[in-house]
């Protein structure tokens, strides 16, 4: 079945490339951004790999690409009995290779058990050499491990999932013997050919996208010893000793980018850029916090003045003061906040740093 679609897919891919549509450019830009983020993860973390054979590798690769924590994929041919096979040799049923996807993943973001569970949703594990409309030993199912430590996890998970089926499960669970990268036109096939053949139900791609969401952040007050290690001297002085930084000589007084301002001690969101305004005072000024539930306001009679101090509720960090000389069209308040008590997260980084739920607040009113 897939042979018919290869020629059509290549022609369609060339046509899309030649057209150079805006949609293609946007998609390409997103791909490049994602590739850079994933490369950073692979450069800096203990990335692991596992190999999944699940029928036609076009759909299997696209499925795993949707899962948060998967940082790289490559389609190829695994566990055969020759060297450097071509696609034509694999489909001849004489080489013993299975169409397979190499999955690189960050174990700090996604668990191997979850990957296996999701993989089972894309296959019929009880059919031998057959998935969807495809027939042949190259379409057999299997999970191949290159790390001996993964063997127990793979076999235990498959054994556990097998109890959900009345027929015997025929998914191979063996060590990776060999793997050869498939031809370039097979790589990222469904990204390049969105209407291309796929044996996986489209709704499963959405399930994959939502299967491993970012964990809800838990914000907790830290003890002063931990904060001394984490913060600069000025940040500690401002947040823990009610200090005040110099006006016009602090990090965010003239920051104009879109984004969110969070408590430097806990990471909890406090202010949004759409509520920031230029007051001329030399410190970041906001018309309001994201919600009053995030802050405490206390009477402050120090320095020979009567003012209203603003503190973060969870972190109990000194932030600054609130005054009644703010713009009337924004409510008349001016939250005058020390930069040293805040960390600014630009809009472009909010999603990956766990603040994606706050992006709608940046919409201009």
Image (cartoon, helix red, strand yellow):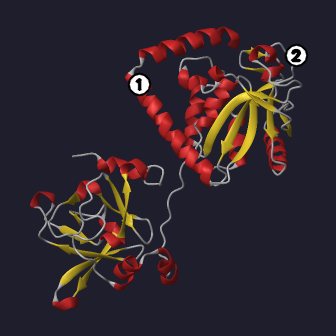
How far separated are the C-alphas under marks 1 and 2?
41 Å
Q: Earlier in the sequence, mark 1 or mark 2?
A: 1
Crowdedness near tag 2: few (<14), some (14–19) or many (≥20) residues, C-alpha within 10 Å: few
**Which quarter shows the N terminus?**
top right
Residue occupying the point 42% across, 27% down = 25
Q: What is the count of numbered marks?
A: 2
**Residue 2: quadrant of the picture:** top right
In the drawing, does residue 133 fall left or right of residue 142? left
Under circle 2, the secondary element is: loop
- Tell me if residue 150 comes above or below residue 184 in the rendering: below
Q: Position of residue 129 (x, y in %)?
A: 82, 21
Residue identified by numbered label 1: 23
Residue occupying the point 40% across, 80% down = 233
Q: Position of residue 207 (x, y in %)?
A: 58, 36
Q: Which mark is residue 94?
A: 2
Q: Which mark is residue 61?
A: none
**Residue 305: quadrant of the picture:** bottom left
Under circle 1, the secondary element is: helix
- Tell me if residue 57 comes above or below residue 46 in the rendering: above
Q: Position of residue 364 (x, y in %)?
A: 24, 46
In the drawing, does residue 14 fall left or right of residue 175? left
> Is residue 171 visible in this depiction of the protein?
yes
Q: Position of residue 20 (x, y in %)?
A: 42, 19
In the drawing, does residue 200 fall left or right of residue 319? right
Q: Give the camera-side residue of 6 and 110.
A: 6
Residue occupying the point 59% across, 13% down = 9
> Is residue 122 visible in this depiction of the protein?
no
Crowdedness near tag 1: few (<14), some (14–19) or many (≥20) residues, C-alpha within 10 Å: few
- Tell me if residue 150 comes above or below residue 312 in the rendering: above
The answer to whether the residue labelled 1 contacts the one labelled 2, judged by CB atoms less than 8 Å apart, is no
Q: Give the camera-side residue of 233 and 209.
A: 233
């Amino acid at each position: 079945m897939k042979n018919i679609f290869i020629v059509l897919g290549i022609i369609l891919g060339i046509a899309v490339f030649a057209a150079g549509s805006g949609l293609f450019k946007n998609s390409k830009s997103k791909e490049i951004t994602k590739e850079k983020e994933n490369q950073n993860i692979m450069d800096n973390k203990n990335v692991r790999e596992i190999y999944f054979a699940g029928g036609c590798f076009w759909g299997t690769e696209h499925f795993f690409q949707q899962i948060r924590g998967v940082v790289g994929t490559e389609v190829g041919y695994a566990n055969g009995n020759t060297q450097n096979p071509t696609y034509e040799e694999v489909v001849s049923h004489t080489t013993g290779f299975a169409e397979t996807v190499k999955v690189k993943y960050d174990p700090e973001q996604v668990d191997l058990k979850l990957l296996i569970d999701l993989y089972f949703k894309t296959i019929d594990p009880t059919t031998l050499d057959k998935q969807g409309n495809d027939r042949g030993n190259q379409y057999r199912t299997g999970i191949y491990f290159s790390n001996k430590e993964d063997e127990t996890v793979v076999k235990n998970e498959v054994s556990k999932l097998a109890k959900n089926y009345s027929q015997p499960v025929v998914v191979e669970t063996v060590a990776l013997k060999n793997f050869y990268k498939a031809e370039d036109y097979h790589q990222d096939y469904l990204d390049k050919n969105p209407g291309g053949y796929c044996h996986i139900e489209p709704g499963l791609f959405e399930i994959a996208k939502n299967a491993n969401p970012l964990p809800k952040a838990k914000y907790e007050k830290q003890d002063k010893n931990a904060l001394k290690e984490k913060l600069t001297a000025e940040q500690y002085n401002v947040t823990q000793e009610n200090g005040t930084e110099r006006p016009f000589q602090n990090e965010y007084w003239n920051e104009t980018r879109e984004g969110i301002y969070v408590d430097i001690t806990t990471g909890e969101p406090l202010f949004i850029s759409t509520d920031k305004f230029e007051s001329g005072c030399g410190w970041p000024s906001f018309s309001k916090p994201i919600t009053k539930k995030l802050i405490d306001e206390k009477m402050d009679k120090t320095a020979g003045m009567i003012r209203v101090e603003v503190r973060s509720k969870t972190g109990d960090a000194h932030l600054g003061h609130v005054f009644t000389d703010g713009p009337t069209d924004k409510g008349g308040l001016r939250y005058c906040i020390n930069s040293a008590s805040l960390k600014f997260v630009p809009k472009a980084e909010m999603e990956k740093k766990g603040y994606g739920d706050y992006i709608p607040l940046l919409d201009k009113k």
